[in-house]
Amino acid sequence: MASGWAKDDATSDQIRDSLNDEIRRARSALPQGPGSEYCDECGEKIPEARRKALPGARLCVACQEEADKSAQRTNPYNRKGSKGSQLR
């Protein structure tokens, strides 16, 4: 079904692009470089299991949860292209 000037598979392209953006964002948030034995924020010891599961970890679980909460954001792009946004 064609909708105006959009290609027939434009919706699929938008969904794929949105997913790729989120994958890139998530990968960029992964820790880089050497990990730490002690949390950079609170100084508590990072458990061995966490350091093995997440190489490069620099925060304990509690501090990482706080960092994740503050890092949540909304996507400024409206890739859905609703009629209302197109008519404005």
Image (tube, rainbow, N blue to C red):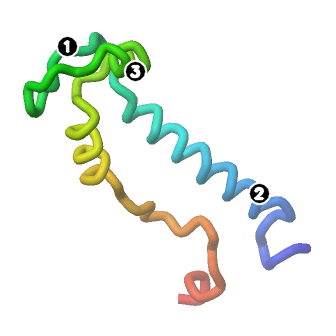
Q: Mark 1 and 2 residues: CB-CB less than 8 Å, in contact?
A: no
Q: State the image coordinates of residue 59 (x, y, percent, origin top left).
A: 22, 29
CA distance separating discs 1 and 2:
44 Å
CA distance separating discs 2 and 3:
33 Å
Q: Is residue 22 above or below residue 81?
A: above
Q: State the image coordinates of residue 43 (x, y, percent, origin top left).
A: 8, 25
Who is closer to the viewer here, 87 or 73?
A: 73
As drawn, the residue found furthest toward the right would be 1
Residue 66 located left or right of residue 20: left
Query: Closer to the N terminus: mark 3 or mark 1?
Result: 1
Q: Is residue 42 above or below residue 70?
A: above
What secondary structure is marked by label 3? Answer: loop
Identify which residue is drawn at 49% across, 64% down.
Answer: 77
Residue that badge 1 annotates: 37
| Type of amino acid at the residue the image marks with label 3 | Leu
Residue 36 located left or right of residue 32: left
Q: Is residue 78 above or below residue 66?
A: below
Residue that badge 2 annotates: 12
Residue that badge 3 annotates: 54
| Type of amino acid at the residue the image marks with label 1 | Glu
Q: State the image coordinates of residue 67 (x, y, percent, origin top left).
A: 24, 44
What secondary structure is marked by label 1? Answer: loop
Query: Closer to the N terminus: mark 2 or mark 3?
Result: 2
What secondary structure is marked by label 2? Answer: helix
- Crowdedness near tag 3: few (<14), some (14–19) or many (≥20) residues, C-alpha within 10 Å: few
Q: How many marks?
A: 3
CA distance separating discs 3 and 1:
12 Å
Q: Mark 2 and 3 residues: CB-CB less than 8 Å, in contact?
A: no
Residue 48 located left or right of residue 11: left
| Type of amino acid at the residue the image marks with label 2 | Ser
Who is closer to the viewer here, 7 or 47?
A: 47
